[in-house]
Image: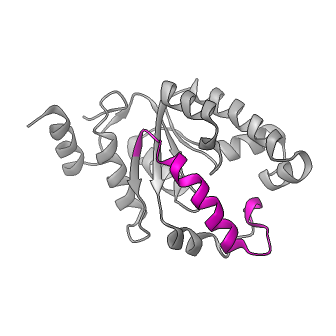
Amino acid sequence: MSKNEQSMTKVRSNPHSGRLKKTVVMVGMMGAGKTAVGRALAARLGAPFLDSDAEIEKAADRTVPEIFERNGEPFFRHKESQVISRLLDGECCVLSTGGGAFLAEANRQMISERGVSLWLNADLPVLWSRVKHKDTRPLLRTGNPRGTLEEIYNKRVPIYSLADLSVVSDGQASIEQMVDRVLVVLATRPDVLEVK
């Protein structure tokens, strides 16, 4: 059995053990579960959980929708890159990012060099079922939010597929089951997760 197989077996038999050696950056579409799964993953590993949108809101003293409305998306994306860079320089953690953060090539490169990107890959019906009743998504404030989501999805999935690691978010697994799946994938990267 290879070292990777041994690590994966340890994680499967005891998915509560491990120590982060690099920050895990959760990427993917709105509604993929980045915050919920990221928070549970951090708790399981005893690591800090941070959300880049929350950190931007704290720094700007306004909500993401307010920043979009007042300053526009380019301003927001610039601040987002600055915040992600600062957080990658801090203590190893689980970092949830907004759906658009991974689209910028500079962000992708920075994340891969200083952490690891993990794509929660959810298909369109799963995403729509999770976001259709929420009005907190600035990009979906259109006359046809379902169509807008599909357009965003089609543009972004090829970019998300460039992530270092990927886990399917099928809408069937519980949050804890998703954390188990993520830990199995992280165990393939000993530079990211030290399995105890």
Residue that protrudes farthest toward the right in the picture:
70
Q: Is 142 part of what is drawn in magenta?
A: yes
Q: Position of residue 93 (x, y in %)?
A: 50, 35
Q: Residue at 69% across / 46% down in the picture?
A: 53
Locate residue 87 relative to residue 164 in the image: left or right.
right
Residue that protrudes farthest toward the left in the picture:
1
Q: Nearer the viewer, residue 75 or 183?
A: 75
Q: Residue at 69% across / 33% down in the picture?
A: 81
Q: Residue at 83% across / 51% down in the picture?
A: 68
Q: Position of residue 4 (x, y in %)?
A: 20, 36
Q: Main secondary structure of the magenta part?
A: helix
Q: Residue at 67% across / 76% down in the picture?
A: 133
> Which region is colored magenta?
136-165
Locate residue 89 relative to residue 94 in the image: left or right.
right
Q: Quadrant of residue 57?
A: top right
Residue 182 shows in the view: yes
